[in-house]
Image: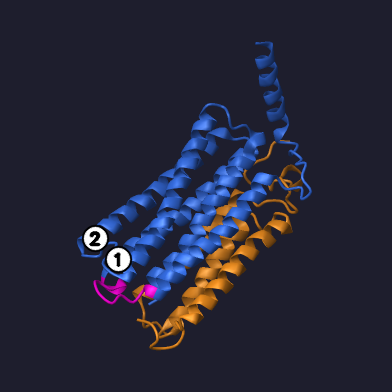
Chain colours: A orange, B blue
């Protein structure tokens, strides 16, 4: 049976996968979603006084939007959601280690204390 | 001669079965060593880019020279970011195409990905040139050094990715990228998507967060 661009690729045909991979339609919808999130990010710059992200709230909003894009690409486009859990462990270990090490470094330089940088 | 013909036939036979049978890897994890190696490499890259981003955050307030707010062209960088984001879509479509055995679409999507990556790099070269003209050289301030090092390292990664994509297109054109080697495209795709997620982080932290 020939596969079409709409069919999921059966797990049995993939290298080490535990779930069927998504197909082209899901990828296109994911890209549209990512594009939409990017537009919202740009709106925070174009309209800085908008109540949803005014003042220091913009930092939190941008961090959340960035995280949404990051996890979407990693889970859908990089297939981490469908692959063996070992690969997730490998990647998240590196990311968490990096986040911890550099958070300690930023705290050591007191970057989160107002007036300490510069 | 006979050996060459036999090899050709065995490759053809493997291709014929590729759509219906995946290649088992003789490893303890059941994952190929190259794929596991790429994920380990990407995990180590988190530490590299984490260090560069942290350095930028520490030095983002320049003591001399132009400030980020004065020189950044957000609409232009937003367009570049969008281009790189869409290259992830074309990359994943290329992986999908080879898994279906559609070599023509594989080449189209790989070519599109390389083209979008080249557009991003062109934008970065233009941006760097504009910044230098405005008086922001590599050694102008601690901010400029951190900024150019971070974005330059990312640019080098994108350039390496483009070279790998073009190599894949050439391999495909020469018939050396059959379906049973789809994992090669997937692994290079992993690298490309990682370069994209790093830029997602850089775009928010460096350009957008005030």
Disc 2 crowd, CA 10 A, few/some/many (<14, 14-19, 20+): few
Q: Quadrant of the N terminus of chain B?
A: top right
Look at the picture and state if B123 lies above or below A111: above
Give me the residue at 46% from left, 84% from top.
Answer: A110
Q: Based on the displayed image, in which of its 4 quarters is residue A55 positioned? A: bottom left
In the image shown, does B131 or B52 lie closer to the viewer?
A: B52
Q: Quadrant of the C terminus of chain B?
A: bottom left
In the image shown, does B49 or B195 lie closer to the viewer?
A: B49
Q: Are marks 1 and 2 in contact (CB under 8 Å)?
A: no
Q: Which is the main secondary structure of the residues drawn in magenta?
A: loop
> Hey, which residue is sitting farthest bottom in the picture?
A114
Q: Chain of mark 2?
A: B
Q: Position of residue B142 (x, y in %)?
A: 33, 70
The residue at which mark 1 appears reads as B73
The residue at which mark 2 appears reads as B132
Q: Based on the displayed image, in which of its 4 quarters is residue B126 positioned? A: bottom left
Q: Position of residue B173 (x, y in %)?
A: 51, 29
Secondary structure of the residue carrying tag 2 is: helix
Q: Is residue B30 left or right of residue B183?
A: right
Does residue B57 show up?
yes
Residues at marks 1 and 2, CA–CA distance in whole angstroms: 14 Å
Look at the picture and state if A64 lies above or below B80: below
State the count of labels: 2
Q: Based on the displayed image, in which of its 4 quarters is residue B155 positioned? A: bottom left
Q: Position of residue A3 (x, y in %)?
A: 68, 40
Q: Position of residue A5 (x, y in %)?
A: 62, 44
Find the magenta span and give its range. B59-70
Give me the residue at 43% from left, 56% from top.
Answer: B154
Secondary structure of the residue carrying tag 1 is: loop
């Amino acid at each position: 049976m020939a596969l079409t661009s709409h069919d999921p690729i059966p797990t049995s045909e993939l290298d080490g996968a535990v779930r069927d991979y998504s197909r082209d339609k899901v990828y296109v919808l994911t890209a549209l979603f990512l594009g939409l999130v990017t537009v919202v990010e740009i709106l925070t710059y174009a309209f800085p006084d908008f109540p949803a992200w005014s003042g220091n709230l913009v930092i939190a909003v941008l961090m959340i939007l960035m995280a949404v894009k990051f996890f979407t690409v990693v889970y859908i486009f990089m297939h981490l959601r469908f692959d063996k859990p070992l690969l997730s462990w490998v990647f998240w270990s590196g990311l968490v280690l990096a986040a911890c090490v550099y958070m300690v470094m930023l705290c050591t330089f007191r970057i989160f204390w107002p007036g300490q940088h510069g | 001669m006979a050996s060459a013909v036999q090899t050709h036939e065995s490759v053809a036979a493997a291709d014929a079965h590729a759509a219906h049978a995946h290649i088992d890897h003789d490893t303890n994890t059941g994952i190929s060593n190259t794929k596991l190696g790429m994920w380990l490499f990407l995990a180590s890259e988190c530490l590299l880019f984490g260090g560069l981003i942290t350095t930028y955050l520490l030095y983002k307030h320049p003591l001399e020279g132009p400030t980020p707010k004065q020189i950044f062209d957000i609409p232009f960088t937003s367009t570049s970011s969008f281009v790189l984001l869409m290259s992830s879509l074309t990359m994943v479509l290329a992986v999908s195409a080879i898994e279906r055995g559609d070599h023509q679409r594989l080449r189209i999507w790989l070519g599109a990905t390389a083209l979008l990556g080249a557009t991003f790099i062109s934008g970065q070269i233009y941006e760097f040139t504009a910044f230098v003209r405005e008086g922001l050289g590599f050694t102008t301030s601690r901010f400029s050094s951190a900024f150019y090092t971070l974005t330059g390292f990312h640019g080098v990664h994108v350039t390496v990715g483009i070279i790998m994509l073009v190599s894949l297109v050439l391999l495909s054109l020469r018939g050396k990228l059959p379906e049973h080697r789809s994992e090669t495209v997937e692994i290079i795709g992993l690298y490309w998507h990682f370069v994209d997620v790093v830029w997602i982080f850089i775009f928010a932290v460096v350009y957008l967060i005030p």
